[in-house]
Image (cartoon, rainbow, N blue to C red):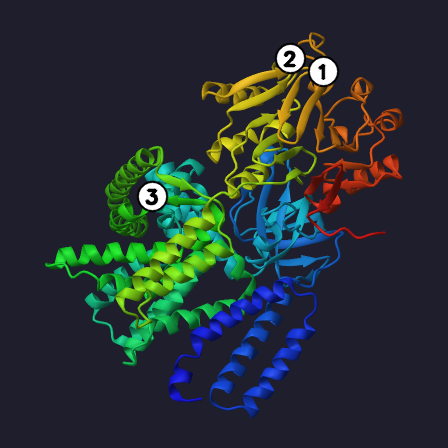
Amino acid sequence: MNARQRGWLLPPMAVCFALGILLGRISRSPWYAAAGIAAGLAGCLLLKSRLRFAAILAVTLAAGCLAGFFAFRPSLPEAAEYEVTGIVTDEIGTGANGQVKTVLSHVTLNGRPFSAGAYWSFYPPEMPAGLSPGRAVSFHASLYHPDGASNPDGYDFREELLRRGITVGLYGDGDLVISDPAFFSWPGFTASLRHRLSGMLTERMGEEAGGYASAMLLGMRKLISSEDRTAFARLGIAHVLSVSGFHVGVLIGLLALIFRLLRLPQGLRLILYALLLGFYCSLCGSGQPVIRASLLVLLLLEGKLLKRPRVSLHLLSAVFLVMLLVSPAQLTGLSFQMSFGAMLGLILITPYLTRLISPAGRIRRRVWEAFCAAIGAQIGILLPELYYFQQLPLLGMLVNVPALLFSSGLILLYWFSLLCLPVSFLSGPVCSAASLATGSLTAVVRWLGDIPGITLWTRAANLLTAAGVLLLFAGLCRLFRLRARIRVPLAALGVAVITVSLCSFPHTSTEYIQFSVGSADAAVLWDRDTVIVFDTGYHDGVLASFLRRRRLTPDAVILSHLHADHADGLADLRENSIPVRLCYLPEGGDRADIHPDVLALTDSLRAEGTAFVFLAAGDEIPVPSGTLRVLWPERGRVRPNQDANESSLVVRMELMGTTLLQAGDLDGKYEMYAAAPSDILKMAHHGSKGSTSEEFLASVSPQAVLLSCDRGARSSEAADRVSPVPLYSTAAGGALTVRFAQSSFSVETYLPVSEE
C-alpha cells in the first residue's frame, strides 16, 4: 500500500468492522468469520497495493463478525435458584405495582464470581431500609435469561442489557441482607457519590432544578419528568438533557480556563485532562456519549501537544473502533448511533455549509457557523431519529442554537452550584440563580412543546431512507470535490428519496396481529387500509409502537372490557399522539366492576372528543374484507357492578371466507351463548381453566387456536386441552400474525418455535 492508502485506511476499517458486527449478530456459526480472518490474513501477506488494502478490510469485516457473534451470544449460567451477593451500582428504580429494580456488579452466584453485571428486580411490601447505590447485598433469587424482542419492531430488553454489560436477570429478594461492602468497589463508589451529589443538588435547588442539574451534569435523565423529556424531543433539543459531547465541551472549556489561570505546563494539563475526564465518565455511569466525547477530546489535545494535527474523521473512526472493540453490542443502541451520527454530520457536512455564505462581521459569522453546525448534526442523526422516533422536529433548526447557548450557561451555573455546595453562604445564591434559570428554560420549552404541528409524524426509516440519507451526505460532504451543478441535484435527490420512503403506501392485504404482551390482550386487524384495534394491553408501549412506526391511525378501538390488562394501553396511544376517534365497549361496560383509573382514562378520552359506542349481540361492524359480528353480551342483560369478564365482548370476524372468534375474557358460565363455528379461535381469558370447555371447543370446532399468555405451564395445559388442534401461543412464539387469503389462512409466529 502507498502512503495515501495507509492514510485513509482507518475510516473504511471502521465501516467494515461495524458491518461485520451486524453480520455476526444474525450469524449462526462463528466458523465462517474465523475462516474469513484466516483468508484475509493470508491475503495481507501475499497481496500488494490495492489488493492488500482490500484484504485488510476483509480481515476487519470478519473480525467484526466474530466479535458480534460472541457479543450477542454470551456464555450464560443455568437458569435456576441461587444465593447471590453483589454491589448496587445504579439508582434504585421503581416500576409498576411496586416493582424495585437496579443493577449489581461484583456478583457471585452460590459463592462463585460472575464476570458480568446483573439486572435485579423484586416486589417488596415496602422499600427495604438502607438499599442505595454503593451498598452490598446478599439474597436468594431466581436467575433468568432476559428475553429479546417478541413483537414486530418491539423493545429488545436483552440487547439493552447487553449494551450495559449485563447478561442475566435476577428476580427475588429472599433473606435480603444489606450491608457496607467488604472491599472497595470503584463502580459502587462512583454510584454512591453520584447518588449523594444528586441528593445535595435536589435539596439545595428544589426537586425540579435539582433533577435537571443531575441529568445535565451526572447523566441521571430519569429524574426529569417524561412530559418534559417529550417536550424537549418535540423541539429537537433532547440532546441537551444527556451528558454528551456538548456537555464535555463545556467542562473542558471550564478546565482550560482554570489551567490557563494556573499557568500549568501542557504535559501536566494533558495528564489532568485524562484523569479528570476518566473520573467524570465513571461518575456519569460510564455512558457511551460521555466516553466517546472524552476520548475525542483527549486525542485532539494529544495531537495539539505533540504538534501533530489530527484529521477529525480519522479521530472519530479511531474512537468508533475502540468503543466497538470494547463492547460490540453498543452498535445497535440509539445513544451510540446518535452520538456518532451527530459527530459525522459536524465533520463532513458543517464545513461545506459554512463556506456557502460568508457573512460580514464576527457575530454574524459565528451565528451562521452555529446554525450550520445545527444543520450538520441534525442531518447526521436523521436516520436513527426517524427509525426510533418517527418524527421530524420542525423547529429543531431554529431553536438548537439558542438552546445550546442558554444550556451552556446553565451547565456552567450547575458546575458552580456543585462546587459551592460545601460553602453554605455561597451555595445559597448560586443554587437560587440556577433554579431560576432552570425554571425559565422549562417554561419556554413547555410552552413551545405544546404548540400543535411542531413535529411531523412519519413512518419508521427503512433501507430506502438510508439510501436517501447517503445521497444527501454525498451532496453535502466536504470530502467529495464535486461541482455545485452535481451537488445540488444529488442532495435534492437524497431529500426526494427520503420523502418517498417515509410516505404511507396503500395496504392491500388482510392481517390479524396478536401481540405478545404477557397475560394481557392487544391485537390489530389491518384490513387493507382499515385499522381496527382489539384491546390495547397494559401501559407497555407495544401496541403504540407498532402503530406509530407504520404511521397508522386506528379507525376504531374495540375494548372487550375495561380491565387494565385490556385497556391500559389507551394511555400509550394518547402519549404517542395517536388519535382514538371511535371506541367500542360492551353493553354496560362502563358500569361493570372495574378500576377507577381505567374509568378516568376513558373519561379523559371522552373529554378529548373520542366517541364511545356500546355493542351487544347482533351488532355488526363492516370492514373491507367482511364483517365483525358481536355475539356477546346480550342487550339489556348486563347488571351494574358485575364482573367485567362476564360481559366481555365476543366478536366473530368473517374475513375473506375465513372466520375468527375473538373471545375476550368471557367467563365459562356464559361462553356457550357465544359458541359459533369458526376456523380460528382466540382463547378466552389467556387460557384460563375456567373458560374454553370441551363443550365450547366442540361447538366452535376451530382449525387453529391462538393464545395470549406469559406462562409456559398455562400454554402447555392449553395445548393439551385443545389437542389435536394446533395451538399458537405468544408465550412460545411471540406475536402471532394471521394472514387471510380467499377461503384460507396461515399463522406465523414472530419467534421460531421448536417442534417437540
Residue placed under numbered mark 3 in the picture: 394
User: Which of the pair 53/468 is nearer the observer?
Assistant: 468
* Three-letter code for the amino acid on which mark 1 is drawn: Pro
Q: Earlier in the sequence, mark 1 or mark 2?
A: 2
| Cα distance in 3D space between marks 1 and 3 | 47 Å
Closer to us: mark 1 or mark 2?
1
Identify the residue shown where x is 39% and y is 38%.
228
- Residue 715 seen by the camera: yes
Q: Residue furthest top?
A: 636
Give the class, few, some or many, for how many residues have Cα within 10 Å of label 2's Cα (few <14, many ≥20): many
User: Which of the pair 582/730 is nearer the observer?
Assistant: 582
Relative placement, left or right, of 353 versus 704 is left
Number of the label disc, if any, that sits on residue 588: 2
Residue placed under numbered mark 1 in the picture: 633
Give the class, few, some or many, for how many residues have Cα within 10 Å of label 3's Cα (few <14, many ≥20): some
Tag 3's secondary structure?
loop
